[in-house]
Amino acid sequence: MARLSAVQRKYLVDATRRYHASLPGSAAEEHLATRGLTAPSVVEKVDRFRLGYVDDPLPGHEQYRGMLAIPYLRLSPGREWSVVSLRFRCIDPDCGHEYHGKYNTIAGDRPRLYNTIEIIRNDDVIAVVEGEIDAVTSSICGVPAIGVPGADAWRPVFREALLGFETVYIIAEGDEAGLRFANTVAADLPNGRIVRLDDGHDVNSTVVDQGANAYKRRIAI
């Protein structure tokens, strides 16, 4: 995919700012509360991810109205934040996802790693998880994590950024798809170590139900 133009970069930054400003008091904030991500003890840590709510969509984003906005932030060589992509999660509990998926990627975009700032900040250990919310949850718990946007979204090219780590913890959600995802990632990472969660659980539900320390104990951090 071609490098983003200056106009495209500005559009994504403007969208991120608008949707993040709409988050307080929104349905998206209520959704994040059910995931344990609006508690006073973590809200400042979560804020850096610039999650948002599509209340007043920019042109081209009308189909995402009412959804949680998840920006893919990057730190540019000039040390300025930029946005390379946006994904959107449907948070309507009554939606059957007949006309869109639970998670929605802008047409023509490619799979990317989420929360890559953790690759820059850490050089010892890092976790690879499935999904953006799990990456947020893991990182604010003290286990730096990058997210892969779906069980089938891993690409071999992603391995290059992770080979310098002593250990890459590959978190397997507690179902067949989760283990398949973990095995796919592990096949590309000689420094990978699979950590399997309880049946039916992902990182976020593990932390919500059992606490951050229970999650960290599984990884021995």
Image (cartoon, rainbow, N blue to C red):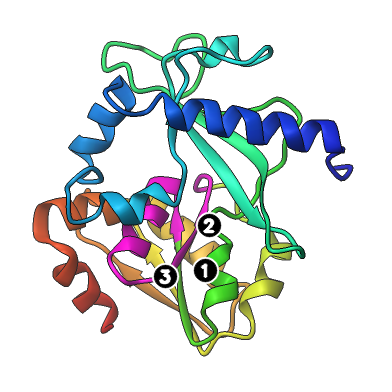
Instruction: Name the residue tied to disc 1.
Output: 118
How far is disc 3 from disc 2 in space, using C-alphas? 9 Å
Instruction: Name the residue tied to disc 2.
Output: 115
- Secondary structure state at the residue bearing disc 1: helix
**77 falls in the magenta region:** no
Residues packed near mark 3 inside 10 Å, few (<14), some (14 to 19) or many (20 plus): many
Residue 202 visible in the snapshot: no
**134 falls in the magenta region:** yes
Instruction: Name the residue tied to disc 3.
Output: 144
125 or 30: which is nearer to us? Answer: 30
80 or 92: which is nearer to us? Answer: 80
The segment highlighted magenta reads 129-151
- Above or below 173: residue 59: above
Residue 98 visible in the snapshot: yes
Kind of residue at disc 1: Glu
- Above or below 85: residue 122: below
- Secondary structure state at the residue bearing disc 2: loop
Kind of residue at disc 3: Pro
Question: Is there CB contact under 8 Å for labels 2 and 1?
Answer: yes
The quadrant of the picture occupied by the C terminus is: bottom left
